[in-house]
Image (cartoon, coloured by chain):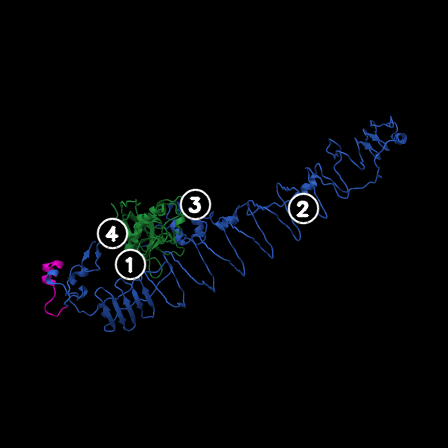
Amino acid sequence: MIYLVDPLYNPNLLKEITSGVYLQRGIPLAKFLGARGTRSQLQQISVDHKQLVRNLYLHAELLRSAQRNTDLQNVRVTVAEGVYVPAINESPTGVNEKKVDGRAVVYQVINRKGKTDIPKSFDLAVYWKDYADYDRISLDYDTYDPNGDLVANIVVEMPNVSESFDVNFSKQIDTYYNGALQSSNELLEILK
Amino acid sequence: MTTSVDTRQNRINLIGEAREITDGVPRDGFNDASGEFPNQDYFFGTSVNKAAKGEIINNLYSGGGEYGIPTLLPEQRPSQYPFNQVQESKSGHVIEIDDTPGGERVLVKHRSGSGLELRADGSILFSSTNNKVEITGGDHTVIVEGTGNLVYHGNLNLHVTGDYNVTVDGNYNVKTAGNHTEEIHRSRSTTIIENDNTIIQGDRSAKIIKNSTETIFEDNTILVKGKQKNFVQKTIDFNAGENITSTAFNQYTIAAQEYRSTAHTVELTGALGVIGGEQIDHFGKMFGGPPGGLGNGGTTFYGTLVGKASNAIVADFAEEAGKAYHARQAAHARRANQAEVAKASKNTWLDNLSADPTDGSLSAYDSNASETFPTVYSYQQIPPTTTMPTSDTIIAKISSSEYGIANVKVDILETDPDSIKNRILRSDDYNDLVSYDPTIHEIRSKLRDAKNREDSKFTGTLIAENLLNADFKRTVPEKINRSANKTKNSRFGSKFIGNNPADKKSKRFKV
């Protein structure tokens, strides 16, 4: 299908790509570059910048839809992992490979206490599952933090966007806990 | 909705005849002539604003916090009638002045969610759902008694046309994931009262157009693991108030058009090699070497010798060889007092010296007075004032004495070569995945790759550094709550469908 692009933020019309270009209202490219888990700069990114921005455009629309959702008024949807720059000798696979060119982005739902909100993360994942276009949504829980806190991440994968914006969305969902698959074709709300 | 200014025909054109007949402008005068009120939410009920009665709470857009940065504001309690004065416009703008005991607040809210709220505890919430512009014609002063947090998800540009003065009474910490660029059009001055530590994991380069001066009042140490090269187009002055020690493990080369080396005491020794040249003059008290003679590893002199030799096998003049063992082929053999053999000289004054060398030489001198001979210096035995350097003594000196070769090793341990470097880089500990201690967010990002998750060195170091939970591979969650499959979920509506409030939120619908 041909994805209809907001002409105000059409990446194909950008003359220069900087971290300050907007992909949606209130969503600059810097939001995906400066994510906490993948702090990167445009100069480091070897992928064609226009291709990168086209891929991220779909994520920007997704993020905007979350911001407009009145059910998420008391939480903030943030980009936890955006564009990934591998280490010199690293050959990323899986999600990290898709993070390199902006196809995959990891989101977190932060509550007013400054922590990930588990129930709202599930709500958002379900909302996106029902109303958004995507290749894959993974609800990814982990207890990596040394203090053992449970953290919820929403990993969203998008297809590679061509210049014509002719894209197809495969719409897969699954749930992971500490990197282990818990369910395919189902989103689970894990509490600990 | 029609308005009072619409003609009937306009309304029919706009909303259709059937609706015009049922919903049109009421004719009895007890309802809003414009048809705008009551609002749909207030059908079949009192028109007192629901916020005034505490049925709803008008909140500004605030969202959640930022990771690790809470934005905790106390929850607003519902208003009590009649303490809350509410003005709500048709489109949804709200002004509230609430005197509800315990929940006193003032709210100015735009329909978009932007606005200003003065809360019961005195907190102020200023919220903008889009841009915010703040212009101050005069001075601007901000005083915060507590902690401040600023988060910009985009770029931040700060332009100060005057001076920019920052005073920090605690520590000043800057962490940059990317480059740090400073452009200073005039001078820079830095004063550090205590220490200055810099760690550079990559290269360092400095270009100085004019002069550079470094004054160190105590010691200066430079350790180089690789090569060090100094190139100076003009002159180098290399002076020490006390000693200079310069050694090389393999080769030490000095080359110049002119080379001068002057000292009160000089010692220049070597096991083998060459000293001197075609136009070199040697001066000294004594020249010595190992015994043994030509071809036997002994000292050999070539050329013209002016002076006196204890042993002379071949000499142009053998004026006096007091204790020579051999003086076989001297051009002139004037006197050989104690020579065992003194034959075949160019001018032979005595044909058969071997018969009686002492007597023969004396008689030869006497019979050839016409020959001119060089000045004969009186023989004096001068014993060597120092021991002759040998290969053994030189090797011992090179390897062990205070004048020996320094064996330079930088950052090398048998058990852990490059230990200091790796401790700085951390790249070895983390298997080249990161070269610094990563944050939990960066660790989470790395562990999304199955290869990295299975990298025991990487994860082991993280656990040892207390950066990763040791239980990170536990794959069974303790509790699962809700679930959702691929089928679209029906949702409770948050907006009415139709005009019948009795049915409003009991209807589930899919979008």
Q: Residue under mark 3: which chain is it in?
A: A
> Which residue in the structure is indicated by mark 2?
B401
| Amino acid type, residue under disc 3 in the picture | Ile
Identify by letter the chain in blue: B
**Which one is nearer the viewer's eye here, B126 or B160?**
B160
Q: Residue under mark 1: which chain is it in?
A: A
Confirm whether circles 1 and 3 share one chain.
yes
Residue B134: horizontal and vertical position, in percent? 35, 64
Image depth: mark 1 or mark 3 in front: 3
Q: Quadrant of the N terminus of chain B?
A: bottom left
- Marks 1 and 4: in contact by CB < 8 Å? no
Identify by letter the chain in green: A
> Which residue in the structure is indicated by mark 1?
A72
- Marks 1 and 2: in contact by CB < 8 Å? no
| Amino acid type, residue under disc 2 in the picture | Ser
Residue B7: horizontal and vertical position, in percent? 12, 63
